[in-house]
Image (cartoon, rainbow, N blue to C red):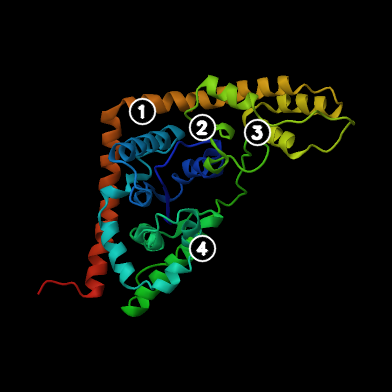
Amino acid sequence: MKTVLSGIRPTGNLHLGNYFGALRNFVEMQHEYNCYFFIADYHSLTTHPTPDHLQDNVRSVLAQYLAAGLDPEKATLYIQSDVPEVIELYLYLNMNAYMGELERCTAFKDKVRQQPDNINAGLLTYPTLMAADILIHKADFVPVGKDQEQHLEMTRTFGNRFNRMYKHDYFPEPQAFNFGRELVKIPALNGAGKMGKSEGDDSTIFLTDTPKQIEKKVKRAVTDAGPTEPNSVMPEPIDNLFQLMNVVSKPETVEYFREKYNDCSIRYGDLKKQLAEDMITFVNPFRERIEEIIADEAYLRRVAEMGKEKAKASASKTIREVREIIGFKPL
């Protein structure tokens, strides 16, 4: 069975873009692949979170993964810092990673521009830590977005360099995983862009949002003065609202409002009211399940411990074999 690995930084709540983008596919994949899903709390240290904030975020993200349908009995769902073997492999890969290639990394150069007062070594060596996350389980596939494709290429570079240096065909070449179908892109409520933290909380529907929060956000969604000619082309903000309706509303509801738009009788207030109701119906079960899981400390601890044991079994085997290949052996 092929191995798939994916991680998420504990930096915020999951939203509809996450769910319809990758998370829904992860739920399906766990039945077909050997899946490792981890919460990347080591990676988050580049932003210097406080201890309480870091722990709260880890708990929240773990609860949200579980509420979305990831099954700790089927997939390995673990916290990155519970597997220190990752850091040992990170050290070995850093010994064979060169300053020039790390400094040329697009993500690093972007961070230098965005946060000139916080250019830390963790940002520079982010690609080697990501490579360690992937190679520690000898993953075959990694779901990545456009901004992570270069990091995956660097992972292959580091793995192949290790194989050549030690004349041992050990690490596989992980490939990008595209889920075998087009991902659903969820637009933001501000009329442009995709739903996500870059567009701001007011334009994003989170799986933890209350009905009142959803109503308020949808009410503020960008619209226009309305169509003036029958069957006219929808401007982007209006098309975005219909795209959102496509994923949370019944087909007959979407068709009703399309007909209203095409005959110029649409009332955007009615559209937003219906969209908000349908979003609340969709999000409420996730929010309620998240709240239930977060309140169950014993369950969260069991899930974390189960994931830790399974992840460490895989990681320990890799580190033991890597140490032997490098030459770390008892005298």
Mark 4 is on which residue type?
Thr
Residue 27 is situated, as x and y percent measured from the top left of the image, at 47, 41
**Mark 4 lies on residue:** 106
Image point 37% across, 71% down: which residue? 97
Identify the residue under disc 1: 293
Mark 1: secondary structure: helix
Residue at 32% across, 25% down: 295
Q: What residue type is labelled 1?
A: Ile
Q: In the current view of this chain or complex, which residue is farthest to the left?
A: 331
In the rendered image, which residue does mark 2 sit on?
A: 206
Would you place residue 187 above or below residue 129 in this image? Answer: above
Chain-order first, disc 3 or disc 1 = 3
Three-letter amino acid code at disc 3?
A: Leu
- Find the distance from the CA under tag 1 to the CA under tag 4: 38 Å
Q: Which of 226 and 70 is in front in this view?
A: 226
Determine whether label 4 and label 2 are within 8 Å by CB.
no
Establish if 277 lies above or below 186: above
- Distance from the alpha carbon under mark 2 to that under mark 1: 17 Å
Secondary element under disc 2, as helix, strand or loop, is loop
* Real-space Cα separation, disc 3 to disc 1, in angstroms: 27 Å
Marks 4 and 3 in Cβ contact (< 8 Å): no
